[in-house]
Amino acid sequence: MEKAQKGYFGEYGGSYVPPELQKVMDQIEELFEKCKQDPEFNKELDYYLEQYAGRPNPLYFAEKLTKKLGGAKIYLKREELNHTGSHKINNAIGQALIAKHMGKTRIIAETGAGQHGVATATACALFGLDCVIYMGEHDTKRQALNVFRMEILGAEVKAINNGEGSMKEAIDEALLDLAENYDNTFYLIGSAVGPHPYPSIVKHFQSVISKEAKEQILKAEGRLPDAVLACVGGGSNAIGAFANFINDSSVRLIGVEPAGLGLDTGKHAAPLNAGEPGVIHGFRCYMVQDDQGNPMPTHSISAGLDYIGVGPEHSYLKDSGRGEYVSVTDQEALDAFYLLSRTEGIIPALESAHAVAHAAKIAPTMSPEQILIVNVSGRGDKDVQQIFDMTRK
């Protein structure tokens, strides 16, 4: 396999794919760079983000949560109010438009919690594209409602039952599909992972989160926040929430990984906190691996965070010290799920609840003049059945 010399964040990223697939990556990169600069493309993208996805969404001052916790003011970036219920639609629309410009007629995607799958199926229905979604069998069971939503939208959902039956295996299968069908197929990656140029593409389309949040906090408070918090699995909502604050050194960037049953148990999905650098799915990043460098099974209460690796830019932000990466357990995330629901009437996705959980830890240690922005990356409708089943056993 050949290693491309571009698309790196420090030592992370790159494109570790066979030569035939590298040609596909080069085509995607070339068109992406053109589309980014094309006023007509951007006009079309903005139209769908505003009129279809519902942007801009609010930056909401969580007054009751702030009062309950004491300390810093907490603002919530309301990505869960987007059409389809999460930040995933931002990127799905953008990449689907690129696929159309490339003349592709078939879209494939991977999904964990199903939110990216739903967003992709939605974009494919909107633009008249065939859609196949790969999903680990374990995830199809705990996210059965989202599987049905994808099918309603016209997508074919393929459950993968090898390995752990989670997001890693779904990505493996999608990459195999792309290698066999690249003539008519576009792989719409949902997170800021994969071979170059995908991490940069996803960051570009998700950076609208921090673009809006920055404008909104300046309007509300007249200054930048002290910290921005977001959950991190592959890392798309987090890199989107961080993007326009990276050059603002006064703003802490805090990514929250899933500690699962505890980092010391080995049952977690926290490569930045408990992993080592390695190569997976065509790129280099921190990953959960054993002493021999073999991928290890992962675990999280949240299907969307249950991934062995993490975006290359997050890996770089960790090493450079610009990003802070912490972890919270399944139980802490579940407690935060109820905390936000019962104080603000906002039911967050279990993924987003990880960020809420860490905000609940640090807000009381800060002064009332300080400000936190928490990215509520998705709504919890998809998780209600899972939590119902867990709590009724």
Image: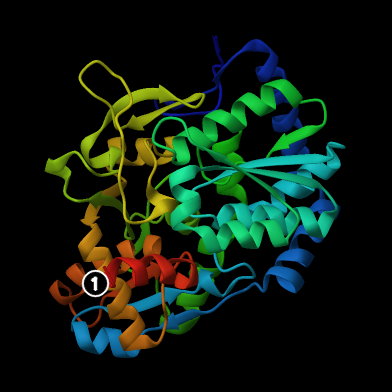
Which residue is the site of mark 1? 335
Q: Position of residue 345 (x, y in %)?
A: 40, 87
Residue positioned 50% across, 62% down in the render = 210
Residue 35 lies left or right of residue 361; in this view the side is right
Q: Answer whether residue 152 is visible to the viewer in this image.
A: yes
Horizontal side, residue 122 vs residue 2: left or right: right
Which percent across, then down, holds residue 349? 42, 67
Where 270 falls versus 249 (above or below)?
A: above
Q: Which kind of residue does numbered mark 1 sit on?
A: Asp
Picture coordinates of residue 130, whole percent (x, y): 80, 45
Mark 1 lies on a secondary structure that is helix
Q: In the depicted view, which residue is nearer to us: 182 or 37?
A: 182
Estimate how packed mark 1 is, as few (under 14), some (14 to 19) or many (20 or more) residues with alpha carbons within 10 Å.
some
Q: Quadrant of the N terminus?
A: top right
238 with respect to 208 (left or right): left
Is 277 or 354 nearer to us in this picture?
Answer: 354
Q: Residue at x 47, y 64 (%)?
A: 377
* Residue located at (72% from left, 21% from top): 180
Quarter of the image where the C terminus is located: bottom left
